[in-house]
Amino acid sequence: MPRLAARGRRGGRGGDHASSLPRTALRLTGAALAAATLLPERTAADRLPRREYAGPDGRFVRLEGVEVHHEVHGPEDAPVLLLAHHFYGAVRVWDRLVPLLTDRYRVVAWDRPGFGLTERPLRDPRGPNPYTRAAAAELGWALLDHLGVRDATLVGASAGGSNVIEMADRAPDRVRAVVLLAPAITGDVGAPPPLRPLLRTAPLRRIGPRLAERFAGEVTRERATRSWADPSRADDDVDLAPYRQLLATEGWSRGLWEVMTAERPPDLRGALRRITAPSLVVTGAHDRTIAPRWGRWVAERIPDGRFVELPDAGHVPHQERPAQLVEVIRPFLAEVLGA
């Protein structure tokens, strides 16, 4: 989750943005239109269909009008863990963690709307927006319903933490436990909130995906591991692959643009106090994206929350330090699930 997450946490700056909105809007519109004329046209051959990137365990199911990509691992009769990835992530970012959990748990990893191999539908401005956080929360429960899962432990990393908090807020009786990894609860990635209605207008929605492609750039080791405590731990084939796959997937830029402009940044502080399930918040001691003190702050506001700071880890401990993370998660799950 990029540093913009922390800006929303401070809050209270909407008036400053609003006072300069007309001038900023005109500049943004002019710059966007000018940049769009410089962008190369994409052809269908430039991107591969989503399904062609699915692994041997990949599954697709149409729910709430969206074809959802997911994987299921572990014993069918075991307690279920639902994994919600961070911003710009996908099912693949859990590849290091999943094998360490499937001896005792049934692990469901899914691509949230706008990311990974989940469908990026064209949005009807007159209909419901499938890219909002509320839609993602409903879709998460719809996926578990499809799999015949009555209750589950919800695991969310960074922006995926906001997804599972919203899921817990909608169906608290179905949540056995919550695990939040460096959760982002009051900020996100995208334009300043007052500008987002402008970015949802027809002209900018047409060129927005092309702008996203231009500014995304290449996936390099330095960029992909910027939030790690020790980037030398990364493996190109495992840790960089999810991000390279995203940029090679048909429709990725439209999905990203829709997510970044869908709505105002979240503010889930009130929802934290409504979480009734036992909750574990884990933050890497060297997290430069969301400082560890914010993880402690989140845990203190959950009625049955507890906090662990993982040594020698950055913002994505599930990728960088999976074995150490499991050593923290397993005792918690054994205590609250009895498994």
Image: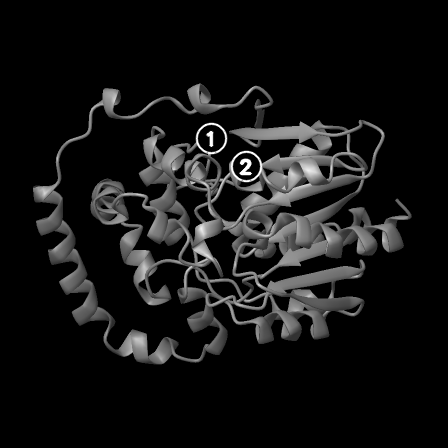
Looking at this rendering, what residue extends furthest in the right direction?
Answer: 338
| Residue 319 x %, y % | 55, 48
| Amino acid type assigned to the residue bearing label 2 in the image | Val
Q: Residue at x 77, y 29 (%)?
A: 148
Residue 40 sits in quarter: top left
- Identify the secondary structure beneath mark 2: helix
Label 1 – label 2 distance at C-alpha: 9 Å
| Residue 34 x %, y % | 8, 50
The number of numbered discs placed on residues in the rendered structure image is 2
Label 1 belongs to which residue?
A: 117
Q: In the rendered view, would you say 56 is above or below 267? A: above
- Specify whether residue 236 is in view: yes
Give the colour scheme of this rendering. one colour
109 or 263: which is nearer to us?
Answer: 109
| Amino acid type assigned to the residue bearing label 1 in the image | Leu
Label 2 belongs to which residue?
A: 91
Q: Residue at x 33, y 66 (%)?
A: 194
| Residue 86 x %, y % | 52, 50
| Residue 115 x %, y % | 45, 39
Residue 218 sits in quarter: top left
**In the displayed structure image, the side of residue 312 where residue 32 appears, left or right:** left
In which quadrant of the rendered image does the C terminus lie? top right
- Specify whether residue 142 is in view: no
Do the residues under discs 1 and 2 have CB atoms within 8 angstroms?
A: yes
For label 1, count other residues whose C-alpha is less than 10 Å away and answer few (under 14), some (14-19) or many (20+).
Answer: many
Q: Residue at x 74, y 65 (%)?
A: 274
- Identify the secondary structure beneath mark 1: loop
Q: In the rendered view, would you say 295 is above or below 133? A: below
Q: Earlier in the sequence, mark 1 or mark 2?
A: 2
Q: In the rendered view, would you say 225 is above or below 142? A: below
